[in-house]
Image (cartoon, helix red, strand yellow):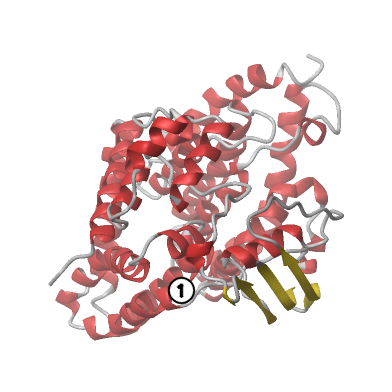
Amino acid sequence: MIELKNLCLAYGSHLVLDDLTATWSVPGIHGIAGLNGAGKTTLFNAVAGFKKPVSGSLHFCQRTLLKEDVFFLETSPYFYPNITGNEYLSLFSQTRYHFDGKQLSEVFQLPLDDLIDHYSTGMKKKAGHYGYA
Amino acid sequence: MVVPSSLKAFVALRYKQVGRLAFDLGAYAVLLFYDFLVFLNFSLFFQRDATATIYVTAAFTFILINIHFSRKDLAFLVHHVESYKIILSVEYLAILFPFIVTSLPGGYTYYWSFPILAALALPYYQPALKSGTMNAWLGFIPFSLFEWRGGLRKIYGPVALLYAGAWAGVMVPYLSILLLWLLTTVCLSFYDFNESISILTDKGGTAKYFLHQKIKLHLQWVMIFFLPIIALHLVFNPNNVWIVVTMVAGIVVLWVFAILAKYSHYVPEHQWIRQSNFTAVMALLAILPFAFVLPAGFAIYYYFKALKNLEVYFND
């Protein structure tokens, strides 16, 4: 169960989400719909830990939601310029003993020796997954 | 001492990035390295004086703060790399290192404790995500200068500081002009992003007409901001007028070069990172004596290239 309790999110004095409470069952596939500027991305940024709530809390299976619980693919994942896919992977493989870049590469079929700057939009989205593998 | 493996990976990454950039730049990389040596020489010269050392260290503290607040990879590092604080500190200390070394002969190295403290403390602070409209004060800049409006929203801090510094330094020979050049190098990043076709062709006409109008408008506004400072500087420093005039001509050439470079590679709503890097290199090189002939030569080349490139979008 993913639970948001009385969540308030703001940019400066501009309150984007006010006292939001919601529950989603796990496992499951859920969608969030809303008008432009309603705060959908802001909510996901908060779930991923990019944005700190003004108040309220986020829970996962009856405990506080941790960074490790979340797999979040940003709208535009960040890549350092002038680096290859393999070099990007090296950032993760050095720090995570359980990281298996080869397995992911087999799934995604990315040209890891090419510069990421030359990847297509779809390839960049795939490469963005490595950050959470 | 145990060096975190992520730091090793990050240093290797930076090393490769710099290597590829140098390879892309070819012979210009050598010039840029020479440029860097000239900066170090300036640093050596300025830091013989206690007051100048305070200014230099204050400037570097400000530069580090600005880098930290504007870096795009901060969220990535915080969320994906375990030892990100050490990585950030090492990177900031690496920026300071050459200038700390050049302070040693002057004997005022202890002033560098402030930027060093900033380098160690900044990684502990994460700027909050921003959203929404900001800086309503930009209203005085017309919409036709959309590059300036967009650019100022991103980096108004350094721009305001350099501009205020240029006003404050009018009595010191060449200081204001040097700061206006530095301000120009910062502002040229405004031209990194390409507008949509509808904005490009808003006024209609031919590519030639568009380019001429664009350069005219932007230079007019550059002069509105720069000329009062240059004039006041010449009032306080009436000697060496020709050197000042030459430096100002170099600054004007840089603005024209940046606009033409942008449109010679224009693709709607796109950014060429290599072209942006090249523009930045040209701006930095222009401080070398007579080196502004390089951007001047490229401006002529880019003018014809831009005319050809824009033909597709205009009624030529």
Q: In the figure, residue A53 lies in which quadrant? A: bottom right
Residue marked by disc 1: B62
Residue B5: horizontal and vertical position, in percent? 23, 59
- The answer to whether residue B165 is above or below residue B216 is below
Q: Residue at x 47, y 35 (%)?
A: A117
The local secondary structure at tag 1 comes to: helix
Compare residues A25 and A49 and report the one nearer the observer: A25
Residue A58: tell me if it is visible: yes
Q: From the viewer's perspective, tell me whether residue B89 is left or right of residue B154.
A: left
Q: Residue furthest top?
A: B316
Residue B39: horizontal and vertical position, in percent? 30, 58
Chain identity of mark 1 = B
Residue type beneath disc 1:
Phe
Q: Residue at x 36, y 71 (%)?
A: B85
Q: Residue furthest left?
A: B1
Q: In the figure, residue B310 lies in which quadrant? A: top right
